[in-house]
Amino acid sequence: MICPHIFGIVALLKAIHPGWSHAAIKSALVTTASVKYGYDQCAAAEGAPHKKADPFDYGGGYVDPNKAIDPGLIYNMNIENYALFLCSMDYNETAIS
Ligand SMILES: *[C@@H]1O[C@H](CO)[C@@H](O)[C@H](O)[C@H]1NC(C)=O
């Protein structure tokens, strides 16, 4: 069920901030997400034994649409920025494409 929830929140953000790119929206969602949910409880991983969730379980965390609307700071990137980043990591043209 996460996909329709995130899709709805992305549509809300896009309606409020029509100029935001995909990267800006993702940034707003991830930088305002929380790893705790109601009653200040930490997320638990699925499966047995039950353990406290880590980033491999919760990803960016629990999305908070109200905070994502006004995240304060967004990391906006386009394909050229990603290519320059990969070049700086010594990826060659073949590897990047
Ligand atoms: C590009 O990088 C890949 C992975 O490191 C390597 O296998 C390949 O030989 C490189 N190609 C060139 C043209 O340097």
Image: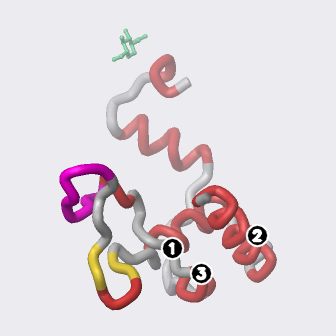
Cβ of mark 2 under 8 Å from ligand 1: the answer is no
Question: Residue 67's x, y, as percent?
Answer: 53, 86
Q: Quadrant of residue 11?
A: bottom right
Amino acid type at circle 2 is: Ala
Q: How many marks?
A: 3
Measuring 40% from the left and 86% from the top, which residue is drawn there?
38
What SS does tag 3 mark?
A: helix
Q: Amino acid at mark 1?
A: Val
Tell me whether circle 1 and circle 3 mark residues in contact (CB < 8 Å). Answer: yes
* Image: 76 above or below 69: above
In the image, 25: left or right of 36? right
Q: Residues within 10 Å of mark 1 (few under 14, many from 20)?
A: many
Image coordinates of residue 66 in percent, x first then y, are 59, 88
Q: Residue furthest front?
A: 48
Q: Nearer the viewer, residue 71 or 7?
A: 7
Sort mark 2 into few (<14), some (14-19) or many (20+) by Cα contacts within 10 Å: some
Would you name the residue on which mark 1 appears?
A: 63
Residue 8 falls in which quadrant of the image?
bottom right
Q: Residue at x 67, y 72 (%)?
A: 9
**Any mark on residue 65, and which?**
3
In the rendered image, the quadrant that contains the N terminus is bottom right
Please state the extent of the stretch shown in magenta in the rendering: 47-55
Which residue type carries mark 3? Answer: Pro
